[in-house]
Image (spheres, rainbow, N blue to C red):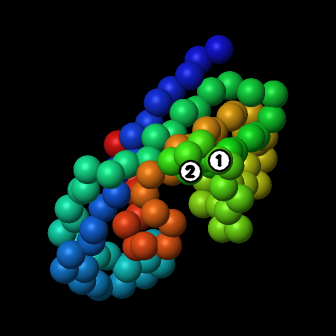
Amino acid sequence: MNKTKLISPAKINFDLKIKYYDENYEKHKISSKVVLLKIKDLIFVSDHSKLQITYHDRNNKIINLKNDIIKKTITFFDQRYKTRTKLKFLVHKNIPIGYGLGGGVF
């Protein structure tokens, strides 16, 4: 069973500016200065029989998220490309939820 470890550091977005709206892509083009912080979430991904996503806090207690961005993203792509993701995600949350320190996988 393959297991991959991803590091998702907290970040602060400084000087976010909308440059223009790209009508071809229907998206805004932005410029931003980002500072990565030392605090980070750890995400372990492995093969599984179905999609399973579990979040743990610093005390290893399970966190139930109402707005699970991993599940939303996978569901979107599974529907769009008619696939069925069979992976297990184990997320160790160190970045406080709702503080505006969004992680990004590196």
Tell me if residue 41 comes above or below residue 21 in the rendering.
Answer: above
Q: Please indicate, yes or no, whether residue 84 appears anywhere in the rendered image.
A: yes
SS for tag 2?
Answer: loop
Q: Quadrant of the N terminus?
A: top right
- State which quadrant residue 45 falls in: top right
Tell me if residue 91 comes above or below residue 12 in the rendering.
Answer: above
Which residue corresponds to mark 2? 57
Q: Which residue is drawn at 56% across and 22% down?
A: 3
Q: Residue 79 carries which label?
A: none
Q: Quadrant of the C terminus?
A: top left
Which residue corresponds to mark 1? 61
Report whether 62 appears left or right of 9.
right
Report whether 58 appears left or right of 9.
right
Q: Residue at x 34, y 57 (%)?
A: 10
Task: Give residue 14's position: percent from left, percent from top.
Answer: 21, 75
Q: Residue at x 51, y 48 (%)?
A: 58
Q: How far apart are marks 1 and 2 (CA)?
A: 5 Å
Tell me if residue 92 comes above or below residue 47 in the rendering.
Answer: below
| Number of marks drawn | 2
Q: Are marks 1 and 2 in contact (CB under 8 Å)?
A: yes
Task: Give residue 90's position: percent from left, percent from top.
Answer: 61, 38
Tell me if residue 3 comes above or below residue 70 in the rendering.
Answer: above
Q: Which of 35 and 24 is in front in this view?
A: 35
SS for tag 1?
Answer: loop
In the image, farthest residue toward the top: 1
Kind of residue at badge 1:
Lys
Q: Please indicate, yes or no, whether residue 76 appears anywhere in the rendered image.
A: no
Q: Which residue is drawn at 24% across and 56% down?
A: 36
Kind of residue at badge 2:
Asp
Q: Which of 20 and 4 is in front in this view?
A: 4
